[in-house]
Image (cartoon, helix red, strand yellow):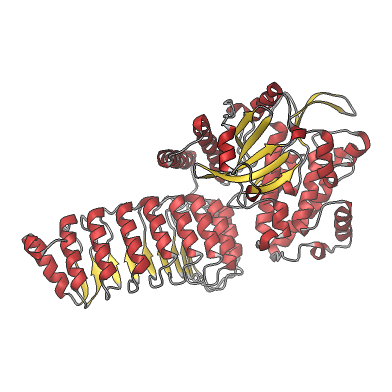
Amino acid sequence: MLSYQNMTEKQQKLFDMVEDASQLLDLCKKQIGNADAKAVAEAIKVNTTMTELKLGGNLIADVGARAIAEAVRANCTLTVVDLAENRIGDAGARAFAETLKVNNTLTKLDLNENQIGDAGAQAIAEALKVNKTLTVLYLWHNQIGAAGAQAIADALKVNTTLTELYLYKNPIGDDGAQAIAEALEVNTTLTKLYLWENQITCTGAQALAEALKANTTLTELTLGENQIGDAGARAIAEALKVNETLTMLYLNNNFLTTDGIAAFRQTGNAICDLDLDDQRAPSNDELAQIFARTSAAITRATTLEAENQKVRFELAAKDQGLAAKDLELKSALDRIDVLKRNQPGVGSAANFDGPIPRVSLATLVTATNNFAAKYLLGEGAFGRVYGASVSGSRVAIKKLSAESKQGSAEFKSELHSLAKFRHPNVVAILSYAEDGDERCLVYEFMPNGSVRDRLNRKNNTPPLTWSQRHRIAADVARGMHYIQGAFSDKPLFHFDLKTDNVLLNAHFNAKVSDFGLFRAQHLDEKSYIFTQLVQGAVPQLVQGAAPYMCPEFFEEGRMTNKTAVYAFGMILLELLTAEKPGTRLKSKARIAVTNQAIAGMLDSTLNPTEADHQSVSEIVTLALECLADESDERPSFGSILTLLDS
């Protein structure tokens, strides 16, 4: 506590001004530092008439911010505190977060242009979950990334008082935008959201568009000075056809062409004031800068994570971090691909030459409490899968069954091959454990489970939207296109492709999992001779995948690169109908097409827009082409991907 007698003359003057203040007191740009802020804080504690205090444009850092936060905690009259353009970091933000948890008078907090970062944003987000009075929060230009945006999004799902949120000039990117979009689907109080200059591309814009279809309170949304192209513009334009509350939308200074702008002109939305000015076409240099910025952000995130973790997987920790970084880079390339649609597909087996790291079995035993039943996620042909946390990271641990076990040399040979097998739409193997006959594989964790579980609405999960289902189909096709071309010298097959083995990450991006890979030694006109099975035996795979197997396999035991295309066709019908796979579903689809009654076969939870009906019809047709009895009549995954991405 700083006594009045120990204050400097300047500090005593500040104390007197604050103590005697009534209503508004403006102390902006007064060269107030940490020591001066302590004097201001002491006066705040005793003032009972001031309602608004402006301290913007000063020199206040964490020490001064903590003192003011503690004083505001004790004050019963302040409703507005402005600390914009100071030097406050995450420690000062955490102090204000603690104040927000108990203060019941503050309605507006301005922390613009400070340095609170993700840690500070996360602390404030936790406070927003319990605060009942704050309505306006300024956090722009604060070095907040995707992690901070994710925390704020989580808070928006439960907060019932915040009406205005200003996050512009923070590098939240598409991951942050997707998280906020998910929150907007359930939030019922936010009316103004400012997200300009946030490094958002079409991926983030498409997620926000889906949110606008469900949100009923947002009136102002700014997305200017981002990197949104025509695909994002079209998605938002479609959303405006059903959204009835948005009155202001800024998309100025993005990458829209005349086609993207025309999409808005055709919506007929009369209530929304649009700003589409100053669009620009991205040059190759701009695209390179976007990629470099994304790569740098991923590198920073990986470095921070490494510094904060206290316990790690021995040698696996380093390789796991590198694998995660590579996957994020591939995901970034996918997002940039919206602007460079004709770029070659990401991912090449030759880019992954490092071995899959080995961890001790004891580490996995500890993480799962000796593979206790409460950690069990599921059981398949190759063994049981457990969910666990290791060094703060969620992973899926597959304990291989006795039927799938092989000799140590053969097992390690297969791991050597799998080490090169990486793609954003294929679930990654992060590490493995081997102790005698006991073997485990550690995979990245997929929090939204399998597509089959989502179609079944297991645990009362909300139904998948048509946009999500379409994206899942494209993701699976992209993953399978990679699988079939991963190794140029030896064709590979996914022998167990089904909706149970298509998993969804936090943003509902789909990844192919549980691949029973076969390497063909030679082939003739009728069959392959299979010489090496990576995980399990043929009978085990056939037993679980029968509804997905093509006629030539059952009749001749023959596999081609069109075998999985048949299974993919069945998956498309499941996405359309949510029904179980099999010949009955295939017949039902054919009858619906013949009778021009496709709408009658769709999942009852789907509510496709008029524009979506054309897409639905095209995918039904594609599904039946994939399910052709003759393999030569089925399309390749390359042509499937071209259709789904168009």
Residue closer to the observer: 166 or 410 = 410
Residue 313, compared with residue 156, is above or below; it is: above
Q: Nearer the viewer, residue 605 or 286?
A: 605
Most distant residue in the right direction: 555
Classify residue 444 by image quadrant: top right
Please indicate whether residue 236 sits to the left or right of residue 68 in the image.
right
The picture quadrant where one finds residue 488 is: top right
- Image point (65%, 63%), residue name: 462
Residue at x 58% of width, y 51% of height:
506
Residue 572, given in percent of the width and then of the height, sits at 76, 51
- Visible in this render: residue 646? no
Query: Which residue is at 84% across, 42% downward?
Result: 543
Q: Is residue 53 left or right of residue 481?
A: left
Query: Number of callouts in the render?
Result: 0
- Whether residue 437 appears in this view of the structure is yes
Find residue 400 and report its image quarter.
top right
Q: Nearer the viewer, residue 270 or 163?
A: 163
**x and y, in percent, of residue 198 in the image:** 44, 53
The quarter in which the N terminus is drawn is bottom left
Apparent side of residue 364 relative to residue 294 in the rendered image (left or right): right
Q: Position of residue 452 (x, y in %)?
A: 73, 53
Q: Position of residue 515 (x, y in %)?
A: 72, 37
Q: Is residue 334 left or right of residue 199?
A: right
Residue at horizontal 46%, vertical 50%?
Answer: 146
Q: Where is 55 relative to 523, above or below?
A: below
